[in-house]
Image: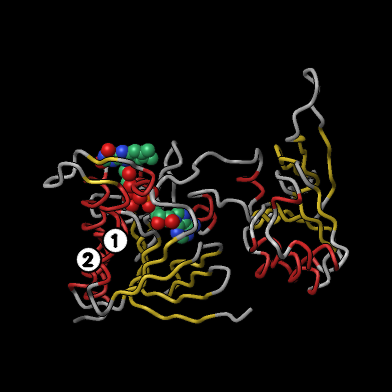
């Protein structure tokens, strides 16, 4: 898999109303801007009908989002690329943000990732992130050579990562909540290498050992059982690679971004986080969870990100 390298002035993580509104302001200021669009759909794309966006009486969520995207992309200096952030190094002069297939270096970052699947999908995931729970097989895999690792998910990326981890010398198992017949075609390649696939199992908890590292996962069968019987299984492991979802805000917290008591990203009246040069806007900061507020906060983050760049470069 080829790793792409990008360098930009402003990286906007998220292509919903907040991120795209930010991009419009960065584009107008002619700043070299990358917008990263994750796998998870923008909440706006999940909205059938929007009746409270000024000037649009019967807009659909997807229709409005498409207009926002076209507007942002109309600036030559703005580029939208796909990928989920899985690792960040923030606030040391330059910021380095990694996805599965790219490294992006940016002077300023605007986080606009929405609420996504805010709930911690697996109990224990949040505290074990970086301690045997990882979202990036390609990045963390080499640390687990000759160790037992599990990949959790059901898409093509899971199968690709299983092969990559095996090549890195890990003892790989895939765990998935669906049946093998529902997995993508490249599952056959994975099975041919002898990687075990544990099907129809949902991970419900990741459990730490006394040293704080992951020790085991507890799983529940997704197959309906007769009566009220639940089939529970436990597996010991050195690392759990979660490819099925990325828990919003946990990765930012791990990178030093302060969250509030309700796990929203803490910002000041200029959308600044606690780290210099890192801004946040929209649903990921809490608030009213409305398109108009997300767009307004995105605009404010974009304006202040550009102001920060001017001051930084004494322009
Ligand atoms: C069913 C429903 C109905 C709604 N109805 C209305 C309504 O009628 N009126 C109204 O005003 N509001 C409504 N809302 C709320 C509105 O959609 C949100 O407030 C708004 O979309 C928030 O914008 P945002 O940019 O903050 O986040 P989102 O629109 O959620 O965008 C988040 C972006 O971040 C990306 N992302 C997430 N994680 C990562 C990652 N790790 N790496 C890279 N990218 C990532 C996602 O791919 C996405 O592009 C509704 C929401 C829902 C769910």
Vertically, is 179 above or below 187? above
Residue 241: x and y, percent?
69, 56
Asked if the residue at tag 2 contacts the one at tag 1, i.e. Cβ–Cβ closer than 8 Å, the answer is yes
Tell me: is circle 2 under 8 Å from ligand 1.
no
282 sits to left or right of 27: right
Tell me: is circle 1 under 8 Å from ligand 1.
yes
270 sits to left or right of 164: left
Residue 115: x and y, percent?
42, 45
Which residue is found at the position 33% from the left and 47% from the top? 44
The residue to which callout 1 is attached is 20
Which residue is found at the position 49% from the left and 69% from the top? 97
Dot 1 alpha-carbon crowd within 10 angstroms: few under 14, some 14 to 19, many 20 or more: many
Q: Which mark is drawn over residue 305?
A: none
Residue 313: x and y, percent?
26, 81
The residue to which callout 2 is attached is 71
**Quadrant containing the C terminus in the rendered view:** bottom left
**Quadrant containing the N terminus in the rendered view:** bottom right
């Amino acid at each position: 898999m080829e790793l792409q390298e990008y360098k930009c002035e402003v990286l906007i993580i998220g292509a919903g109303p907040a991120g795209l509104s930010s991009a419009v302001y960065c584009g107008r200021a002619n700043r070299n801007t990358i917008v990263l669009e994750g796998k998870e759909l923008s909440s706006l794309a999940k909205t059938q009908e929007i009746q409270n966006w000024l000037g649009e009486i019967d807009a659909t969520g997807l229709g409005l989002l498409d207009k926002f995207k076209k507007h942002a992309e109309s600036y030559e200096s703005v580029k939208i690329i796909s990928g989920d952030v899985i690792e960040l190094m923030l606030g040391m002069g330059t910021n380095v943000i990694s996805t599965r297939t790219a490294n992006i270096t940016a002077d300023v970052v605007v986080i606009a990732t929405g609420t996504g699947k805010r709930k911690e999908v697996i109990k224990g995931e949040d505290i074990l992130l970086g301690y045997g729970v990882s979202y990036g097989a390609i990045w963390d895999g080499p640390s687990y050579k000759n160790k037992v690792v599990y990949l959790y998910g059901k898409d093509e990326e899971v199968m690709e990562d299983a092969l990559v981890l095996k090549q890195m010398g890990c003892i790989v198992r895939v765990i998935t909540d669906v049946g093998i017949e529902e997995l993508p075609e490249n599952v056959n390649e994975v099975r041919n290498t002898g990687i075990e696939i544990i099907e129809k199992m949902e991970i419900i908890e990741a459990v730490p050992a006394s040293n704080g590292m992951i020790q085991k996962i507890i799983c529940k069968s997704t197959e309906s059982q007769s009566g009220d019987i639940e089939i529970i299984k436990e597996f010991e492991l050195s690392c759990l690679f979660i490819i099925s979802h990325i828990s919003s805000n946990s990765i930012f917290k791990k990178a030093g971004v302060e969250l509030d008591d309700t796990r929203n990203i803490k910002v000041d009246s200029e959308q600044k986080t606690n780290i210099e040069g890192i801004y946040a806007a929209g649903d990921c900061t809490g608030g009213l969870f409305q398109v108009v507020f997300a767009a307004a906060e995105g605009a404010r983050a974009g304006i202040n990100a550009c102001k920060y760049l001017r001051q930084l470069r004494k322009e």
